[in-house]
Amino acid sequence: MSAVRERNVQVNGASNYKRAAPIFHSEDHRIHLLILALDYSNSKQRLPSVIDAKHIEDLAKQCGVHEVLTLYNQQCTKDAVRKAIKTTGSKCGVNDYFILYYEGHGTVLRDPDFQSAHDEAFVLVDPNGKASPATLFLENDFSTLVLDNFKPETRIILLTDPGHEVPVIDVTREYWAGRQIVHVSAVDARRSDEDLRRGIFTHALLLAIDKLSRVGRDNYSVGMLFNAWLLEDEQVFRGMQDLEIQTSENFSPDAMAWPLVPPAGYQAPLSRCTGPAGVLSNASMFGIQSSLLQHVVQEALNAPVSIEEYLNYVQGQARFQFKPCRACSS
């Protein structure tokens, strides 16, 4: 089986995994979540990353995540991130999950002598909160660190929103073979517009989890979650955010259970701030950026769904007509 790499395309949403989510094995299956978010307040390229990351932090609490480590803004130095990954790796057992959530900038570092030689990178900062070439966390460094510090059996999920043309991490590379790893990344083909789409990645994810809960799903695959995520992006945000999913060789999204499953009754932030007349005027109290609301199709929020039709979509049995590069033509 080859690695999976799909952009804006539904994948197999079946549940073909042998190990269920930790909510069904609370004693010996644990979740370790590392959240990295940078606003770059000392830069002209500022982002509202931390406010989105706090929604993920809240979701983790509701899901009973065993360990949540957050590094925000000037805490996101290379040394701190390396230490966090090593520490988490030492704690993860063979049945555990490691989830990395990254919200910030991504870039590419090119060799001036060999333009074809390049490495993608996360843009971290120094202790004063400033980004520079010295603070770039290269893909190769990240991959080596994870491979050296996590057991091969540990399930790994990367969720990254780097505002970059390609995902910073490519888990389809052969050195990831044999690992159970899935990477979902926001992809921005038009860098000039990336800031306009900030927040869609996170809020579409939370809406997907919300809707899957509402239709009675508490045991589903990463593949089903990705399909539901695509659907919310399309219906609520007009498909403005391109989403890519990757897996390692000989692995697929349907072979891993999605671990962040909240109790029944969970509502995403956008669901909580929506009434019969649409999004409430005090949406900012729910951590919703006004810049995000301009992209929201309000009638799509909390709209009734046909459970049978919805499940056909998220299982990948019925194909939804997504544009190949939705953000490019939005």
Image (spheres, helix red, strand yellow):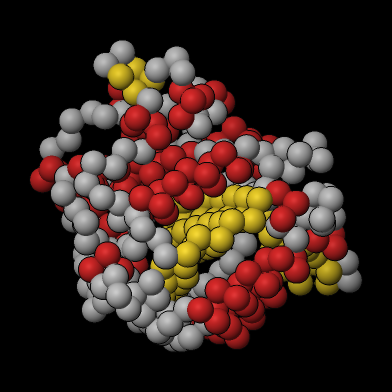
* As drawn, 266 above or below 95: above
Residue at point 40%, 17% (across, down): 280
User: What residue appears at the point 47 percent right and 64 percent down from the top-left corner?
Assistant: 67
74 left or right of 176 in image: right
Judge from the rendering whether residue 81 lies leftward or rightward of residue 132; answer left or right: left
Where does residue 311 sit, x and y in percent of width and height? 17, 50
Depth check, front residue: 127 or 311: 127
In the image, residue 152 above or below residue 240: below
- The x and y percentages for residue 289 are 54, 28
| Residue 262 visible here | yes
- Residue 242 locus on image (x, y percent): 48, 46
Q: Is residue 175 left or right of residue 324?
A: right
Count of numbered circles on the image: 0
At 59% from the left and 56% from the top, the residue drawn is 70
Front residue (pair 283, 179): 283
In which quadrant of the rendered view does residue 153 lie? bottom left
Quadrant of residue 125 within the rendered picture: bottom right
Judged left or right of residue 143, residue 325 is: left
Q: Position of residue 170 (x, y in %)?
A: 56, 69
- State whether residue 234 appears in this view: no
Q: Which residue is outermost to the right?
A: 113
Q: In the displayed structure, would residue 110 be above or below residue 1?
A: above
User: Is residue 20 shown above or below 10?
Assistant: below
The N terminus sits in image quarter: bottom left
